[in-house]
Amino acid sequence: MTASPTALTLADVVVPWRPATGLMRALRAVLLVTGGAGLTALAAQLVWFAPWNPAVPYTFQTAAVLLVGTALGSRLGLASMALYVAAGAAGLGVFADGSSGLGADGALRASIGYLGGFVLAGALVGWLAERGWDRSPLRTIGLMVIGNLAIYAIGVPVLAVVLSMSAGDALWHGALVFAPWDAIKIAVSAGLLPVAWRLLGYRGAPR
């Protein structure tokens, strides 16, 4: 019995798991989960400042979260982001600009909600990818928008509580100032992911 096309992710095609023994499947899962967490950690170190908001640093962290989740699927995407958060919580400098821990200072405590959002988003975009949402530009845009909203749905309220901010201020400083950067990431993903599927011999959303 073959896997349904709707269950395929990029990782399933590039690093196939059938046929394979249980040990090989487990090793494959470990490598993919670890690799995804490592990629996210590297992306978090790429820090820059936008001219429209010079006080808040921007990274490629969320882009990596969404791409890893999309490529790995719901279960491995969730596991990879959980490993990433756990590594940072344990003291490894994998968070933005080499930071770590969950309560070292006020700025980092305010990011706890976003870290939780990464785990949710990794699972959610992976679930959508398993249903072919990353195989056409329009659906990829939808997938990335939903993933970003999932991150903000947890990150912004926690930011407001931790820093005692009003809902409006938290929404502005925790989400809206990042909207131009998010739009760029979404546009790039909408071009790259469908192209990757076409290069692998898959066209359009699975039927």
Image (cartoon, grey):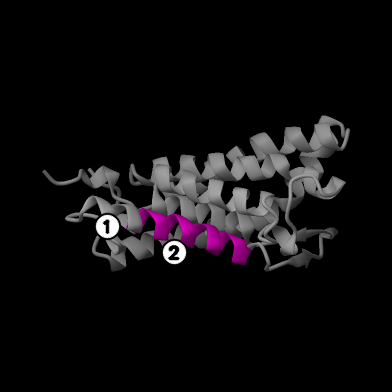
Does 187 sit above or below residue 175?
below
On screen, residue 11 versus residue 166, left or right, reads left
**Disc sitting over residue 104 in the figure:** none
Residue extent of the magenta highlight:
28-43
Q: Is residue 137 visible?
A: no
The residue that appears at 48% across and 55% down in the rendered structure is: 68
Q: Is residue 191 above or below residue 167?
A: below
Q: As drawn, is 138 to the left or to the right of 46?
A: left
Report the disc number at residue 192: 2
Residue 53 position by quadrant: bottom right
Q: Main secondary structure of the magenta part?
A: helix
Q: Residue at x 82, y 49 (%)?
A: 104
Task: Please tell me in which quadrant of the rendered image residue 151 appears.
Answer: top right
Give above or below for 86 relative to 189.
Answer: above
Q: Residue at x 66, y 60 (%)?
A: 94
Say which amino acid is labelled 1.
Answer: Met
